[in-house]
Image: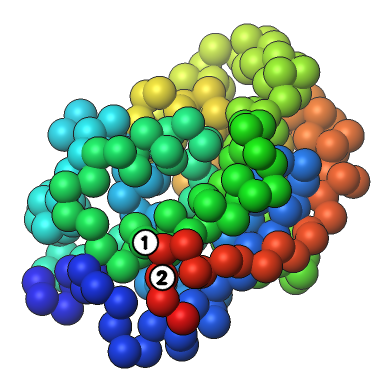
């Protein structure tokens, strides 16, 4: 457990950690925190992601301690180690959820301080406007599927027109296909509160391996892809210099 819990204060190698983190505005008011290391990316996002969409009421919308979540997740996965970073690749959190979570932290640690600096930097760009933060492992389009999936979440949150079009597509789906996809999504550990958002993101940008055998899934994807593709041309990552001085010492 000791190696799984994050330090409360900045470690001696903090600069080496910070140098692995980059911030991009990939779409207007949609920001990507790019961290190639899976474990570091998972640790920066874990608290906020589970606050947003955990399938457990003990964590979704609640202030919780890392130790409690680690214990829960290891019991859930039946593993003797904390495999969160192996099980999830991309992360996505809307600003209101992100900042609400920040007010309910009972065991502040170095990864929270990193996120605080990220949010401060984003505020310097957007002011009081809403924004969306995603976490991915690359920004250059080498494998755009993950970027596209997370941007689809950002569009669902930030564009009322996009959300309305995709919600209409969900309502027009064959009920059997929709219910099967929804069950696959909740079975992956997502909360019920984000099922519609996950449906549109997967069907717009590529379904997971556990969905490819669903009958008529390829046909169901077509209207979602058409909507997303009309926005995809505006995905142009612009690097934003992170200001670590607000919460972390250089």
Residue 1: image quadrant is: bottom left
Q: Which residue is mark 2?
A: 248
> Can you give x and y, in whole percent of width and height, for residue 117 in the image?
48, 59
Question: Of marks 1 and 2, which one's residue comes earlier in the chain?
Answer: 1
Query: Residue 131, percent across and down?
Result: 62, 38
User: Which image quarter: residue 199?
Assistant: top right
Q: Secondary structure at mark 2?
A: loop
Say if 66 sits above or below 55 in the image.
Answer: below
Residue name at image x 16 percent, y 34 percent: 58
Q: Tell me the crowding category of disc 1: few under 14, some 14 to 19, or many 20 or more residues within 10 angstroms, Cα based.
A: many
The residue located at (31%, 89%) in the rendering is 12
Quarter of the view holding residue 114: bottom left
Q: Residue at x 79, y 60 (%)?
A: 238
- The reply to whether dot 1 and dot 2 touch (C-beta < 8 Å) is yes
Return the x and y of residue 142 as percentages of the image width and height.
75, 70
Q: Residue at x 65, y 49 (%)?
A: 124
Check residue 113 in the rendering and tell me which mark sits there, or answer none.
1
- The relative height of residue 164 versus residue 2 in the rendered view (above or below) is above
Q: Is residue 42 left or right of residue 58?
A: right
User: In this figure, which colouring scheme has been used for the structure?
Assistant: rainbow
Mark nearer the viewer, 1 or 2:
2
Question: Is 44 in front, or is 144?
Answer: 44
Tell me the distance, in whole angstroms, between the alpha carbons under discs 1 and 2: 7 Å
At numbered mark 1, what does the secondary structure look like: helix, strand or loop? helix
| Residue 110 is at least partly visible in this image | yes
Q: Position of residue 97 (x, y in %)?
A: 43, 33
Q: Is 59 or 169 nearer to us in this picture?
A: 59
* Vertical arrangement, residue 190 with respect to residue 145, above or below: above
Q: Can residue 76 be seen by looking at this rendering?
A: no
């Amino acid at each position: 457990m000791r190696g799984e819990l994050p330090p409360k204060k900045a470690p001696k190698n903090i600069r080496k950690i910070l140098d692995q983190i980059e911030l991009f505005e990939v779409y207007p008011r949609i920001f990507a925190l790019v961290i190639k290391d899976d474990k570091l990316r998972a640790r920066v996002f874990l608290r906020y992601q589970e606050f947003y969409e955990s399938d457990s009421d003990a964590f979704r919308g609640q202030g919780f301690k890392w130790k409690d979540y680690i214990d829960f997740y290891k019991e859930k996965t039946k593993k003797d180690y904390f495999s969160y970073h192996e099980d999830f690749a991309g992360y996505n959190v809307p600003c209101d959820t992100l900042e609400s979570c920040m007010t309910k932290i009972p065991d502040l640690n170095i990864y929270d301080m990193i996120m605080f600096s990220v949010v401060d930097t984003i505020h310097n760009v957007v002011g009081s406007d809403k924004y969306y933060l995603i976490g991915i492992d690359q920004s250059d389009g080498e494998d755009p599927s993950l970027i596209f999936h997370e941007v689809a979440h950002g569009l669902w949150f930030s564009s009322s027109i996009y959300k309305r079009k995709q919600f209409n597509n969900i309502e027009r789906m064959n009920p059997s296909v929709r219910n099967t996809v929804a069950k696959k999504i909740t079975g992956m550990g997502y909360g019920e509160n984000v099922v519609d958002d996950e449906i549109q993101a997967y069907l717009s940008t590529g379904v997971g391996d556990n969905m490819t055998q669903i009958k008529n899934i390829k046909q169901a994807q077509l209207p979602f892809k058409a909507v997303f593709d009309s926005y995809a041309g505006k995905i142009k990552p612009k690097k934003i210099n992170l200001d670590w001085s607000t919460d972390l010492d250089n």
